[in-house]
Amino acid sequence: MESWERTRRRWQHAFFGSWLVLTSAGPLTEVGQVLPVALVAGLAAWYAVWFVLRTPPAGEVPLPYVAGGALLCLGLFAIDRSFLVVCLCVLVPYCMDAVRIGLVAVLSCAGGWLWHSYHHGGSISWTEIAITVLIAVSAATSVGYFSSVARQSAERKELIDQLQAAQEARAAAERQAGVAAERQRLARDIHDSLTQGFASVVMLLEAAQERSPDDRHLAQALCTARENLVESRRVVRALRPGELDDGGLPEALRRLSGRLSDETGIDAHAVITGPLRPLDAQVQAELLRVAQEAVANARRHAGAGRVTLTLSYMEDLVVLDVHDDGDGFDPGRAAAGHGLLIMSERMAQLGGTLLVESAAGEGTTVVASLPVAAR
């Protein structure tokens, strides 16, 4: 994107330079004085100071540049009215970005030309008026064209930036999901093999010790087996999502709402409805991530005073509902929001759906649902 901006600036400099030469070459030849040449050179240098040696932020209008350029143009206009068109060069940098400024420049120059003709000749012919109007319309059309091209380019740049950011966010989410899935697989494998094996060994050694309570080797083997059983369980717990260790998803949502209230003062609470049922570890982890993202959005952007997390166990569905009473937004214009995209992808990967309901001033509701029967 930096190369695109540099290219745009180069075209702007070329546009200014060519327009300055085109509009001042004729009048300088006719006048034939040193002062006009110095003023035109000063105008070029003044432009270079503000737009070549430094780069103003996009959309900024440096008032010192406009004021200095206007003074130089007034000096040229006082020498000869033919230099009036040169005054457009002061606002040429904005003809590509701000159509209003360009149109003001065109109308000012057209009005100045007609006023100068009337002041020196005492009258204005209809031919002069018609020619001036045609030139002004042509110049205004050029300004509008340049402005539309610049606006379209800026929109494309913004879309490309958003696409790159979304791709990076999606890649990060996929990496995170892959790591989480691998940790879950390892936890299951360790639990189903090593942990169960150690538990069986402990039971067999306990039975053997009951028959030979004085056997020192059996006691040592039993102690070692118990230690390894405890260690394998510790590894399994470390591989599972920490938030789901105690009480599963319902307790994790209660802790999440409690932290939100403690840290921000927002009235947040979690509600669990329906008969509890065991859920796949990945389902719990993904629903928790959706809840965390929705709560983070309410905390950062919504200005909410109340947040409610509702987990509903239905006959064939488990539904997570996160509602806030904040400012709300237009979901149709939220395509740039990476969080919504990631939450939707999380649900789609598990065969579920994500619904976002919101309107300005009416709060926001995020509903994530998963088919339990399908899992």
Image (cartoon, grey):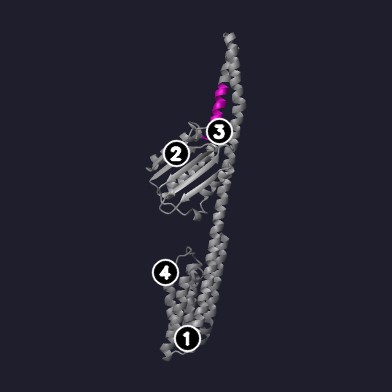
- Based on the picture, tell me whether residue 39 belongs to the magenta stretch: no
Of marks 4 and 3, the one in the foreground: 3
Of the residues shown, which amino acid type is indicated by label 1? Ile
* 323 shown above or below 150: above
Residue 224 locus on image (x, y percent): 58, 19
State the residue at coordinates (54%, 49%).
Answer: 341
Of the residues shown, which amino acid type is indicated by label 2? Leu
Of the residues shown, which amino acid type is indicated by label 4? Leu
Residue found at the very far front of the displayed protein: 315
Q: Is residue 309 visible?
A: yes
Q: Quadrant of the N terminus?
A: bottom right
Tag 3, which secondary structure?
Answer: helix
Q: Which mark is residue 63?
A: 4
Residue interval drawn in magenta: 227-241
Residue 226 locus on image (x, y percent): 56, 20
Report how far apart the C-alphas of labels 1 and 2 lie in the structure: 73 Å
Of the residues shown, which amino acid type is indicated by label 3? Leu
Location of mark 2 (residue): 256
